[in-house]
Amino acid sequence: MNQNQIDTLAQDIVRLHSHTFAPCTPQAVPVSTDPAPIYQAALRACSALGFIATDAQCLARAWQAQTERTGSLDLTHWPDTVEDFGLQTSPTVPDFAPCPPALGLYAVLPDAAWVGRMARAGVPTVQLRYKSTDTAAISAEVHAAVEAVRGTNARLFINDHWQAALAAGAYGLHLGQEDLDAMQPENLAQIRRSGLRLGVSTHGYAEMVRAHAIGPSYIALGAVFPTTLKRMTTAPQGLARLAAYARLMRHYPLVAIGGIGLEQFPAIRATGVGSIAVVRALVNAPDPEAAAAALLQAMT
Ligand SMILES: Cc1ncc(COP(=O)(O)OP(=O)(O)O)c(N)n1
Ligand SMILES: Cc1ncsc1CCOP(=O)(O)O
Ligand SMILES: [Mg+2]
């Protein structure tokens, strides 16, 4: 295939998928040494469709693998098969304790008092997201959160503080990509052996590939919409990408997060994710219990 044919192929992929991923902010095409024409065309197309370099590279490999696996180039079929992303259907390492496939409404909360309040309001999955570097304060808040959900049906995940989560006997732990960077393989192995469930944040294809290699209990996908609560290094993913990610990661319990309120619930649910995580929709609500009831209703 010559350069003109590769360019035409790239344009065809963009033409067929730009309506799905619009609006797109084209990204620079990453330098690549892979000479395969499908890879080259897909790399250009995915960059034009707004995927950041690492994600465009993952997608280009997947387009190439999909074509080799099926024996034909189907430009209409956006890659959605884990094997085409170089992943096995079941991860080998370390494979964490399972959690239910649908975690339902997931409240991410700033302290143990909020955790108890939302657990008593019937929210099935709650997270203590207590930002502090004071080890004693962290330990006290995590223990208080574990106590706060006692007698309710809520599953409690602890954000960031894995040692405290282990010590307090929480249901699970949530880690982001930077948290994973700071972990030793032995730390992850210890968490897995303890039976603590692990949720991992992802913001695109490359991070999903990384998460899959760890084999977490669930995968969080975000930020779907702009959020004021966290400085994100990636652009909001939007509904179309969320749907594509949800198709690829369908074997995992999935959690959508970021800028989601009651109004967005139907569209998010339609992507197939079994859980929606919110912060402001609950903690900024004039009546958080009433807001929880409405969000719970929208989850069913
Ligand atoms: C359910 C869920 N998804 C994503 C996050 C974000 O985690 P992380 O990227 O580590 O950022 P911080 O929350 O630690 O600021 C989350 N907490 N929960
Ligand atoms: C912690 C976190 N991680 C990704 S978005 C986010 C904050 C979500 O808050 P909100 O639901 O208020 O947008
Ligand atoms: Mg974190």
Image (cartoon, rainbow, N blue to C red):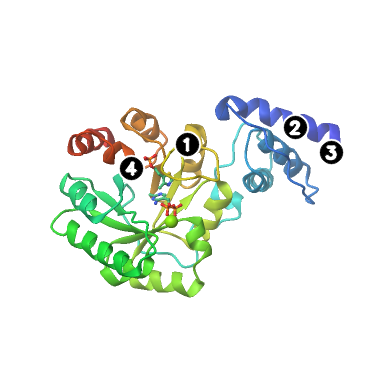
Label 4 residue near ligand 2, CB within 8 Å: yes
* Coordinates of residue 98 in the picture (x, y in percent): 35, 60
Give the quarter the ligand 2 occupies: top left
Report, in whole angstroms, how far the alpha carbon at label 4 lies from the one at label 1: 22 Å
On the image, numbered disc 4 is attached to which residue? 279
Horizontal side of residue 289 vs 36, given as left or right: left
* Coordinates of residue 288 in the picture (x, y in percent): 21, 38
Q: Amino acid at mark 2?
A: Leu
On the image, numbered disc 3 is attached to which residue? 1
How dense is the environment of label 1, judged by Cα within 10 Å: few (below 14), some, or many (20 and up)? Answer: some
On the image, numbered disc 1 is attached to which residue? 243
Horizontal side of residue 40 vs 143, given as left or right: right
- Nearer-N-terminus badge (1/2): 2
On the image, numbered disc 2 is attached to which residue? 9
- Nearer-N-terminus badge (3/1): 3
Q: Amino acid at mark 4?
A: Val
Residue name at image x 34 percent, y 50 percent: 101
User: Residue 84 has which mark?
Assistant: none
Report, in whole angstroms, how far the alpha carbon at label 3 lies from the one at label 4: 51 Å
Q: Amino acid at mark 1?
A: Ala
Report, in whole angstroms, how far the alpha carbon at label 3 lies from the one at label 1: 32 Å
